[in-house]
Each structure stands twice: as C-alpha cells, then as structure tokens.
Image: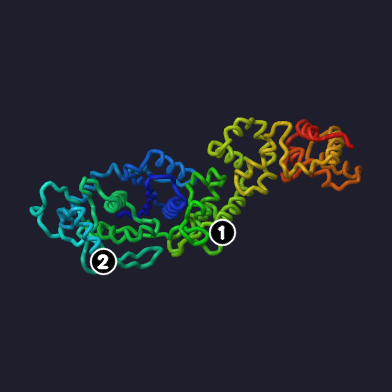
C-alpha cells in the first residue's frame, strides 16, 4: 500500500449530480488535496438500464462547474466485470465463496421464516458446505460469500467512531449473479483495491455495507481502507431532503444563479466545522479540512443561508469576473440566448460600469441579470405596475423640465447630473425624492435600481434624455 492518500468519488449515473453527491465529492477532493494525494473518479454504471450517457455527462459537468477536479481518467465499473469475476474465482478457490443453487421460492421461504423469527440473517446457508454434485440439473447458481458465522466485524470510522456488527447477523451476500454479472458489493471492493484507494469517504447510507465489504477485503488478504461515513443532508425541518427543501441537481443551482465558489463554501459547512469560521477560500478549506471535524448528526439545508452567502460572494467578486460568470450562465437559463445576442462590446462596457451598483442588492446572478434589465430595454421601456403610480401628471411635468436642464449639461457624469438634478429640485421647491423617484421609474421602469445618478451615467446622455422624454409631458 502506498503512503499517498487516494480518495475516490463513485457516483451512479442514473440521474443528475445531486447536492449530497456534490458535497461527498468536495469532501473527498479536499481531503486528498490537503495531503498531497489524489482523488479518483469512478462511474458505477453497472445498472445498465438506468445508467445513461446523459447522466454521466451531467455528473462530469456538475463537478467541473463546482471546480472539483479528479486525477487520471474516470474508471467505468461495468468495463471491469472480467476482473470482478476473476476475484470471485480466487474466493472460490480459497474456500471463501460457494455456489448457491437455491430457487427463488426457497429464498422467499427463508426470508419469511427469518423475519418471523426476528432474525436479520435472511439466508440460512444451506449451500455453504454442500458439494456441487448435489446441484439440481439446469440451474445456474449465484456465487455467495462465505461470511464468518461467529465473532464480530469492527470498523473504526473516522466520523461515526467505532462501529461493531455481530457476524451471526450478517448474510452470505451474493458476489456473482446467476447471469454471471458481479454485484455492487463485490465490484466496489475490487475497484477500490485496484485503484489504490486509501480512504473511503461516502454517505452514511453505506455504513452497513462497510461491514460486508471489510469481510471481503480480509478474505482476499487486502488492506482495508480508512472509512468515513458522512451523515446525509436533511431539510430545514429535519426530515429527509426532498426537492422542496433543495434536493436539486448541481446543475439546477447553477441555473438559479449561484456562484460555484459560494456553493463550495456552503457545501463544506454542511456538517463540517472549523471553529466559528463561516467564510472559506478554497485554500483555507484545503488547509483546514479533516474528517473528525464532521459531525455525526445530519446537516440541514437552508436556502436562505445559501442565498445570503452567495450575495456575499457576488459583492466581493471582481466586476469583470461577474460579467464572465453571467455570460457562462446565459446558456443555462430561459431567455438567456436573447440576452446574449444583445451583449455587444458597448453593452458589456455598460454592464461593467453598472456592476458596482447592481451587485449590492443581488443574492444570485439571476437577480443581478434581472436588475440589469433596464440596460437592455428598448425604448419606450415597459413600466412596472409598482412604478406606474410614480409617474403622475405632476411628475411627468417635472421630467419634462428636468430633461431640458440635463440636455444643457456639458460633461455627462454621475456628479454633473446629480448637481443638475439637485439644483432643479431646489428651484422647483420640491424634495429631491419627488424628482428622483419619477426619474428612476422613467429610466429603469422600476421602483428600485442602482443609484439614480449612476444609472444616468451608465445609460449615457442620449439614452437617458430619450427615456425621460418618453415619459415626460407638459406641466398641467
């Protein structure tokens, strides 16, 4: 066994990369990175009916978006079936596995009897020591593992602590089905061994598998990897995470406008803590992450906390980097193609100029794009129903007068337009808000926006005056 730490992420490609899978991948990645090791990727595609190329692509895409990299080419479990069968032959030769010819009816009777007697060991071992000469004609056997009948199996788990199983309660599990296909339980052990995996970090729904897999390792004389079983993620109410809580694919969070940096930060804090620190750069995560700091209780998913964290990341992200993030997001959202078509160099410049004001309020990139909508709007711009009451006849009259004064401003900046607007309000003997709010409605169609003088500066003289004139009228 090498001294190099080797972890692995081993998703089944039967759907998208869900949020729990994303966290498991992150934990494996961080643990390996912190120790100068490797994280490998294995696609567990043995379920041929449900495993699809589209799902594999979605998993790889989700990992790439999260910024989680893997070493070497992905390993595809199904392609290793011959190797799995080879190991079963080893176990048969060593007397640690046997052929079982029990019929489906016999198995059903065994299970029913065991459950009626309150036993967890469902298979009664009737073929453990019978010779193959007793085999019924024409029946293809399964190959079962000859599990120890006495003693106990112990796993010193890095998260769960010392976990003990009584061997008398563990079944002789099937290693090879009657059609010759290996089972998941066998394939995982063989693949982890052959890939040199030193640390298995996975959800605690696999904890019961750990005892059976350890027995297979020991039967083969292989070193058992260090194991860490992470509690699953629950909803805010403590129940199993569902779609209403946030059990979405990682790709869905991208489409909702979350930044991958924020997502990584949020996921690392789901069940893991490092003192009271909440915000982590990637470098800080790698330096601090360790398995014993993972709690044993299920983590609770909180959309509000994720939104607030994402808003913080948006505010601290460079304006040009945010524009790039928006452009990367557009192909994944409805109507994104129409926005992309309007992103001329001039429009990119306007977005960059508006970004400081836009990102102050936005908690997601979707909100940021939405609040930047006024930049893309064609004249005459649509007025939001909430903003319409601001454009009273009196307000429209003020807009007409203001447009005339602004037209005389020499150098068009936030500062010069602010001075002109303030002077106009003072001469009209009205409060600044009585002018500024109708101006906001006329320029953006909304009641909220970045600072109104920044909006004037970003839109420029011609567009600003045009929009004001569209909504202006002569004073009554």
**Is 129 rendered above or below residue 412?**
below
Q: Is residue 294 left or right of residue 311?
A: left
Q: Is residue 50 above or below residue 94?
A: above
Most extreme residue toward the left, as rendered? 133
Q: Position of residue 391 (x, y in %)?
A: 80, 41
Mark 2, residue position = 116
Q: Residue at x 61, y 39 (%)?
A: 323
Q: Secondary structure at mark 1?
A: loop
> Could you tell me how far apart the alpha carbons at marks 2 and 1 are, in whole angstroms?
50 Å
Circle 2 packing at 10 Å, graded few (<14), some (14-19), many (20+), is: few
Q: Nearer the viewer, mark 2 or mark 1?
A: 2
Residue at 53% of width from left, 50% of height from top? Answer: 263
In the picture provided, is 312 more to the left or to the right than 219? right
Q: Quadrant of the N terminus?
A: bottom left
Please name the residue that numbered disc 1 is placed on. Answer: 278
Q: Any mark on residue 347, and which?
A: none
Residue 333: which quarter of the image?
A: top right
In the rendered image, residue 87, in percent from the top left (x then y), is placed at: 21, 50
- Residue 18 can be seen, yes or no: yes
Give coordinates of residue 232: x percent, y percent.
44, 58
- Determine if residue 450 is in view: no
Q: Quadrant of the C terminus?
A: top right
């Amino acid at each position: 066994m090498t001294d190099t730490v080797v972890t692995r992420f081993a998703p089944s490609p039967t759907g998208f990369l869900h949020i729990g899978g994303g966290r498991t991948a992150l934990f494996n990645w961080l643990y390996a990175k912190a120790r100068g090791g490797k994280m490998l990727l294995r696609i567990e595609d043995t379920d041929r009916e449900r495993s699809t190329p589209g799902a594999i692509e979605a998993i790889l895409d989700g990992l790439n978006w999260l910024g989680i990299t893997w070493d070497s080419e992905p390993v595809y479990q199904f392609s290793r079936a011959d190797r799995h069968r080879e190991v079963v032959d080893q176990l048969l030769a060593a007397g640690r596995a046997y052929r079982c010819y029990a019929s489906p009816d016999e198995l059903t009777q065994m299970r029913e009897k065991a459950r009626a007697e309150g036993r967890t060991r469902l298979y009664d071992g009737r073929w453990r020591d019978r010779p193959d000469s007793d085999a019924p004609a024409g029946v293809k056997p399964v190959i079962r593992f000859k599990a120890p009948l006495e003693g106990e199996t112990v796993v010193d788990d890095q998260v769960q602590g010392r976990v003990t199983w009584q061997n008398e309660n563990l079944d002789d599990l099937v290693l090879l089905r009657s059609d010759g296909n290996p089972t998941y339980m066998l394939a995982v052990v063989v693949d982890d061994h052959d890939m040199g995996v030193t640390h298995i970090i996975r959800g605690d729904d696999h904890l019961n598998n750990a005892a059976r897999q350890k027995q297979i390792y020991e039967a083969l004389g292989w070193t058992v990897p260090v194991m860490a079983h992470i509690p699953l993620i629950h909803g805010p109410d403590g129940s199993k995470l569902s779609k209403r809580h946030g059990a979405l694919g990682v790709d869905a969070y991208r489409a909702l406008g979350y930044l991958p940096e924020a997502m990584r930060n949020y996921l690392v804090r789901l069940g893991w803590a490092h003192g009271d620190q909440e915000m982590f750069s990637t470098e800080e995560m790698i330096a601090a992450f360790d398995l014993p700091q993972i709690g044993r209780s299920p983590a609770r998913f909180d959309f509000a906390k994720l939104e607030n964290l994402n808003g913080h990341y948006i505010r601290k992200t460079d304006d040009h980097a945010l524009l790039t993030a928006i452009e990367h997001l557009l192909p994944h959202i409805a109507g994104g193609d129409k926005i992309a078509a309007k992103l001329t160099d001039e429009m990119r410049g306007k977005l960059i100029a508006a970004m400081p004001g836009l990102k102050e309020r936005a908690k997601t990139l979707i909100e940021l794009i939405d609040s930047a909508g006024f930049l893309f709007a064609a004249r005459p711009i649509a007025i939001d129903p909430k903003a319409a009451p601001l454009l009273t006849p009196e307000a429209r009259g003020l807009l007409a007068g203001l447009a005339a004064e602004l037209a005389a401003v020499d150098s068009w900046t936030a500062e010069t337009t602010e001075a002109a607007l303030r002077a106009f309000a003072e001469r009209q003997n009205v409060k600044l808000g009585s002018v500024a709010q109708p101006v906001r409605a006329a320029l953006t169609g909304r009641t909220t926006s970045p600072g109104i003088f920044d909006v004037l500066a970003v839109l420029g003289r011609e567009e600003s005056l045009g929009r004001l004139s569209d909504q202006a009228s002569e004073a009554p």
